[in-house]
Image: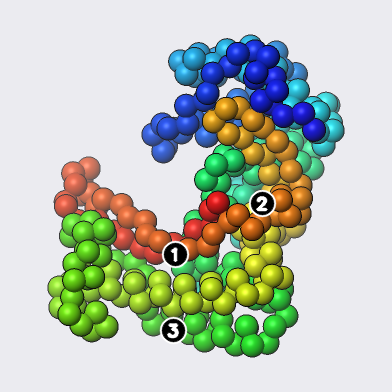
Amino acid sequence: MKKLSEFVNESGIEELNMILEADNSWGEIFESIICEAWNSHGKSLGDYVKEAEKRGIDPVALAENIYKCLSATGEISDSLTLNKLDNVPDTTQTWYDLGLYTKKPNTTPKTDIISSDNSVKISVKEESGARLMSGAVNETIATIRVAVEESGDKELKEFAEGIFEKLKGRSTRGRIKGTTASILKKLKLRENPTDAPEDESERVIWEIEQAKNELAALIEEIKKFPKAYRALLHEAITGEVKFGSTSPATANYILTWDKKGNCELWGIDEYINKFGNSYKIYATYKSSSVKVDGVKTGARDSWMVMTLSN
């Protein structure tokens, strides 16, 4: 399959600038550009011409290059159109049960771009630092349980369920004053790190750290079971159990692209075979500023997520 970079070199397209605001990222814009380029058969970027031009990219060459890249794979019929996926169905009951949810699960689809006949469902990832998932604790539990069930290993299942029981009693989200990073520094300086702090903000992060350590132990155990680890990657990429195998939200292809404009389309198994070993699983934090009537209060909500990234 011919890479987009081969056409980039011919056209003189400069390196793509990927760093923009998160809610209007170049990555999201690039998904729309892919659709426009394909649907126009490489003749136009539609309403995204200026988005390319302000980054020093020739929109005519980019449209042609993307179309040639995807067309060369032979995976997408020329009669099909590509569009960003908007409407997402609820998750399966199985997923709800696996994740021990008490409220409606997050329904962010794994599919970013879908063909007009729903046969091609593409998850778009930047090649460098591609994140397969970043989910809070219930999402994490459901994903891991899918992997553990697939492994068929009784001891691993018992170990995992023991961890999940412990997580039920752990707080994985809370409100703090200051930043998570600054509180973590304070916790590291404590003489008795295993004792719960008296300070309310420190206690919140200390509780999350306890849950994080439990989850980290489980992740390390799963890495010892190749079948379980592969199943974890598969679910994180596709959302097959989360949404169901026939759902438009369940991805069956991955499209990778990088800062130089390289573009490749992969089947799921093909992608895991090639890049699965480069992914790391770790627990980390997310946080958001607390506002009242649009004004920041100085407090932040902090919570734990599991991330899979290369």
Is 122 in front, or is 74?
Answer: 74
Q: Residue at x 76, y 41 (%)?
A: 120
Q: Secondary structure at mark 3?
A: helix
Residue contact at pointers 3 and 2, CB within 8 angstroms: no
Is 145 in front, or is 79?
Answer: 145
Name the spot of residue 189 as percent of width and height, x first.
18, 71
Residue type at mark 1: give it: Ala
Residue type at mark 2: give it: Phe
Name the spot of residue 100 as percent of width and height, x first.
52, 75
Disc 3/disc 2 C-alpha distance (Å):
32 Å
Q: Quadrant of residue 276?
A: bottom right
Nearest to viewer (mark 2 / mark 1): 2
Disc 2/disc 1 C-alpha distance (Å):
20 Å
Judging by the rendered image, the residue that carries numbered circle 1 is: 283
Residue type at mark 3: give it: Lys
Q: Residue at x 64, y 30 (%)?
A: 262
Judging by the rendered image, the residue that carries numbered circle 2 is: 275
Judging by the rendered image, the residue that carries numbered circle 3 is: 166
Which numbered disc, 3 or 2, marks the residue that appears first in the sequence? 3
Q: Is residue 113 visible?
A: yes
Nearest to viewer (mark 1 / mark 3): 1
Name the spot of residue 46 as percent of width and height, x first.
61, 16
Q: Is residue 113 left or right of residue 81?
A: left
